[in-house]
Image (tube, rainbow, N blue to C red):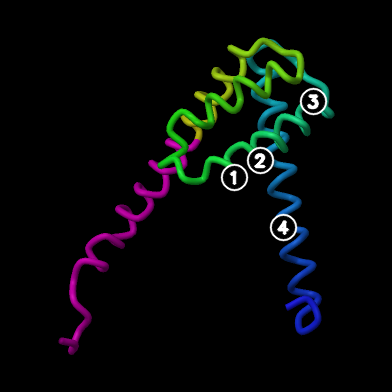
Amino acid sequence: FYHRATRRFLLALALDFGGRVLAVGEFYLICAAIGTPVTPAQAYLIGGLAALSVNITFFVPFELGSKEAGLFFIYHFVGLDPALGVTVSLITRVRELAWIATGIGLVLASGGAAKAASPPAGGT
């Protein structure tokens, strides 16, 4: 893939990096919003270890508890209050639910659910 489409590979790499920077920025902003500012280096470490924690526990459905436990230990490791890790995890869950609700609302508003349920015209 790299040799056949180097430009596409580099674009994919840049988009992945941008997504990770946004994830680190989310930890930074959440901590600042709840009154516990962290350094960019701490936010980077938290973001990286949180991604590792979620990837290691991939077998847990919907990350039930593993995300919270991972952030609890990560915040303790970084030298912050471990309860802050659980708080940040809950805030990110609320953000995820808001985006899910937005997506479902957009599908319903566009009539996509009705289109998906009806059979194609002229088909069997």
Q: In this view, does 70 lie to the left or right of 104?
A: right
Q: Is residue 59 left or right of residue 8?
A: left
Question: Alpha-carbon neighbours of circle 3 within 10 Å: few (<14), some, or many (≥20)?
Answer: some
Q: Which residue is drawn at 61% across and 36% down?
A: 53
The disc labelled 2 sits on which kind of residue? Leu
Name the quadrant containing residue 71.
top right
Q: Give the range drawn in magenta.
A: 96-124
Residue sitting nearer the eye, 75 or 39: 75
Residue beneath label 3, please?
42
Label 1 vs 4, first from the N-terminus: 4
Q: Do the residues labelled 1 and 2 touch (CB within 8 Å)?
A: yes
- Mark 2 and mark 4: Cα distance apart in space: 19 Å
The location of residue 123, given as percent across then percent down, is: 19, 87
Number of marks drawn: 4
Residue beneath label 4, please?
15
Residue beneath label 2, please?
52
For label 3, the SS is: helix
Q: Residue at x 47, y 37 (%)?
A: 63
Q: Are marks 2 and 4 in contact (CB under 8 Å)?
A: no
Q: Residue at x 18, y 89 (%)?
A: 122
The disc labelled 4 sits on which kind of residue? Leu
